[in-house]
Image (tube, coloured by chain):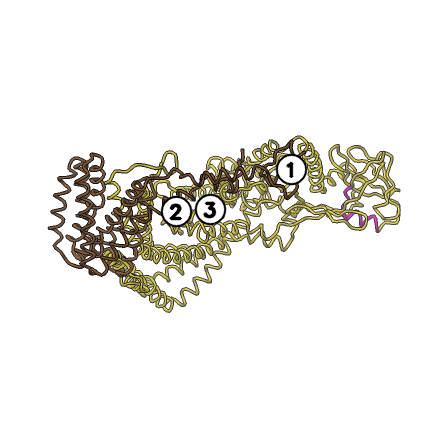
Chain colours: A yellow, B brown
Amino acid sequence: MSVRGYVYWPTGLVRQCKLSDEPLVVLVLRTSTSDPLVIAVIEESSYEAVEKPYSEFGRVRSGNVNLVENSPQWRGDYTPVFFDPPKLNMMQFYSLEPISLVLQDPFKDSGIDSIESSVIDDDETSILKLREKCNSKLRQNIDHLNLYYQHLEIFYKRYPIYKSKSPLNISVTGLKLWIRTSNPYRAIRCMAFYLAVLIRVVAGALSQFLNWKLLPLVKLFATAQQIDLRCQQVCYIPLQYLRINKNMILPDAEPRIDEKDDINPNGSSSGLRQRRKSHSVLPKALPCETYPDYIRLYNTLWLIINDVSFGASLGGILYENRIVMAQNISTSLSYLLYEIPVRITEILEHNPLGIKLNDELSRFLSSLFLLIIEFTYTGWIRPCIQPETLTQGIIVLSHISTLIGLTFPLALAVDFLSIMTLHITLFYMISAKVYHVHIYVMKSLFYLFYGKKQNRLRKRIDDTHFELDQLLMGTLIFTVLIFLLPTLFSFYLVYTVFRLIDLTLKVSLELTLALVNHFPLFALLLRIKDAKRLPGGIKLKVEDDHLVIMNNPISFLMMFEPFTTVLRSMQREMLSVATLKMIAQGSVIQVQRNKLYRVLYYNLPRYPIDVELLWEKLKMVMEKDVI
Amino acid sequence: MAAETQWRRLLWLKQPFPDTYTDPDFYKQWEELKRAHDQSRPHSSYKSVLLDLFQFYHMIINTMLLYIIFAWFYHYKYNPVLIAGSISSVSFLVANKRVPWKSTVIIVFAMLTLSPVLKSLSKTTSSDSIWTLSAWFTAFYIISTSTLQSKILPTNILFSNVTVLSSRLETSTQVFCFLLICIQINILLPTVEKYLIKSKMKLLHMLCVIATHGTVYYFVTKLMGVGITIPLGISSLLLLFGIPHYYIHWEKYYYKGHPFLQQWDAKKPILD
């Protein structure tokens, strides 16, 4: 019986076979669970027998690897699969699942498996098992392909005679060692060590203060959120460094599990991704596990640098144009925040568009709103939007921008806008609440009107008997409310439109902020520079009579997945039928910044690493390096 | 062959008879039917139908009272307090035991509070819309009273009609008095009448009915002249006495369940 199988050929060796005139002996790595992997081809003249786990696969005579004369122990039909050996030190590798650019939940996998197995019947289970088996075999093969150079190194250690013939060589620099023993290096290292711990303590405390449960500043101000983000990033950097450069196994920081759930309910992809961890037979030296951390760390650093450099140019522009800008902002803000609301409220008072509203109520409402406008305008809007004040503000802003980056002025602008539009928020809240209560009462009274009552306990509408006085009172109030509804609704609608415009403006500013903070710049550049470093799976291509295994890099869309999620959730909250329904019911529409923005926090753990643990680990690294 | 199986008047059965087959029993059945037709079927008595119809007519007249009172205030500008006071005292005497004291007070105070609001409620709405609204309310009221078992919806519709109309009045006093009178007349009057029927005070009931009808026709005459009242009265009388005849005729010959009709009616399939 002939065996059918695959044999994995590195492309370098295939080329070597083609160039060589002599017959070549093909040596493979043989393990019980995976397919043979070609380790070396050796000229027949200089070949000596090898021991396990290496084995003589066969001989190539004509330079064509498809025509291998198989040795007796490898009888059978083997299809060659070509691959480019990934350079692990260049951080290239194959992966069956796309690598994650955000922190994932490590415990999610088991749940999905159990659901799968419980739902399907016996027949399907057996098919699934078979598939699982094939899958795990492929997985092991892929692991060996990833470790190709390591295998090669081990092979050369055992059989040094073949080494000179190898087309690949590995060099070690002695310079590093020399530097590490010098004194200035030690001093710098010591300082870096204390600095890292100090920063962790200070930034952690600041972040904790901003997230304080009693007064969560993060939820109120965009600036607080920005500061919090930077603090968390700074806290996470030492951890990432340790994990990448020292291969230290640290307790994986708790990722944002609960938040993931309601945004991406079908978490199957992440489950698959996680499955590889349990199957993985890779030594810890492989960068696959820490590699996403590497991308995240450098992405963060790069973005911070970017931010500062953008900030410098923005600061310059702001400073140069401060007077013109202050003038324009002052006039436009006073027009938008004072003149337009006043004018529209006055129009509403006097039969807008020929619709006759209830005089008393509209007069009452408009005088209430005009009072609020006057109060806020004289209270803080007018002093704040004086051109002189604005000029001062822009100067401060430009300094901040030059020092700590573009994001801070942006966040400050968002906060400035929210304070300036406080009266619009207030109008909206008042009218929405009144309208909501109005609708609610009308609904109940309407039930009373035709002799029904809501049964709260059974959640249905029941027939009831009402007394005459109840009926009369109910109908009287119902009639009054019906006549007042159009007036209230027109006020409510106008302020809802105001509010939505205001929200759109703020949200778009915040999105810009998010883009500057979380743009996957590093991943994008990696994708362009070397797609092999961002594996998103493998693909097999048929060429003539052999297969070629290739890397399927992560798609661009996937890199922007957090952004698309944010946009989708925003669309759900602001531009959907549900929103219209909410407006009709008078429920308050609120876009919670942290709720929208938290998707972008996914590349950060929820809680920063424990200070003592960090101290301990850093100390360990210091001591190890000294020895 | 034909003698063995009985022919059945069912088209969907495959029967061993020619298409032109006529059942010998057909003529017998026909005779029976003719006899049944000649016999008078049980039907409602003329008196009971007349009384029922009269009740409906009386209900419409009662509803008209509302507009008459409105016209008093709106068109003739009568002093509302006088009328309201007199009617209140009468109804107080009549229905003293039947309506709880507390709820009366609550309603009166609620109306007192809301009458200024009601007065200005529809100030910006044109009168025509209010008249239309009120007409629709009346139509719904009449339909719902004569079709629904429950009295809740009719009462509510009536009261909203009153509320809507009252928002046309000029002073708060008028509004309050109008509401009060309308509640008393439209809600208490039927109750009183029912009570009178129940306790068999026929004379009082008759007096009550005649007073109502008299008031309505008096106002119709006053508003539109005798030229309208006489044709209106005659036609309503004709209808009142003519419609029961027509109804009984229909019940005799056309009401479902008549054996003559039933024999040739399309059969309703009985499923399970």
Query: From what the image shows, is residue A82 above or below residue B4?
Result: below
Percent x, y for residue A288? Answer: 62, 42
Q: Residue at x 22, y 46 (%)?
A: B186
- Label placed on residue A219: 2
Q: Is residue A49 visible?
A: yes
Predominant secondary structure, magenta span: helix
Q: Amino acid at mark 1?
A: Gln
The answer as to whether the residues below labels 3 and 2 share one chain is yes
**Chain of the residue displaying label 2:** A
**Closer to viewer: mark 1 or mark 3:** 1
Q: Amino acid at mark 2?
A: Lys
Marks 2 and 1 close (CB-CB < 8 Å): no
Q: Sort mark 2 into few (<14), some (14-19) or many (20+) by Cα contacts within 10 Å.
A: some
The quarter of the picture where residue A323 lies is bottom left
Q: Amino acid at mark 3?
A: Arg
Q: CA distance from mark 1 to mark 3?
A: 80 Å
Q: Sort mark 1 into few (<14), some (14-19) or many (20+) by Cα contacts within 10 Å.
A: some
Q: Sort mark 3 into few (<14), some (14-19) or many (20+) by Cα contacts within 10 Å.
A: some
Q: Is residue A510 left or right of residue A115?
A: left
Does residue A11 show up magenta in the picture? yes
**Chain of the residue displaying label 3:** A
Q: Is residue B190 left or right of residue A151?
A: left
Q: Which residue is mark 3?
A: A598
Query: From what the image shows, is residue B56 above or below residue A157?
Result: below
Q: A218 or A155: which is nearer to us?
A: A218
- Label placed on residue B15: 1
Q: B46 or B111: which is nearer to us?
A: B46
The answer as to whether the residues below labels 2 and 1 share one chain is no
Q: Residue at x 40, y 65 (%)?
A: A319
Residues rendered magenta in the picture:
A7-18
Q: What is the tally of numbered marks visible in this picture?
A: 3
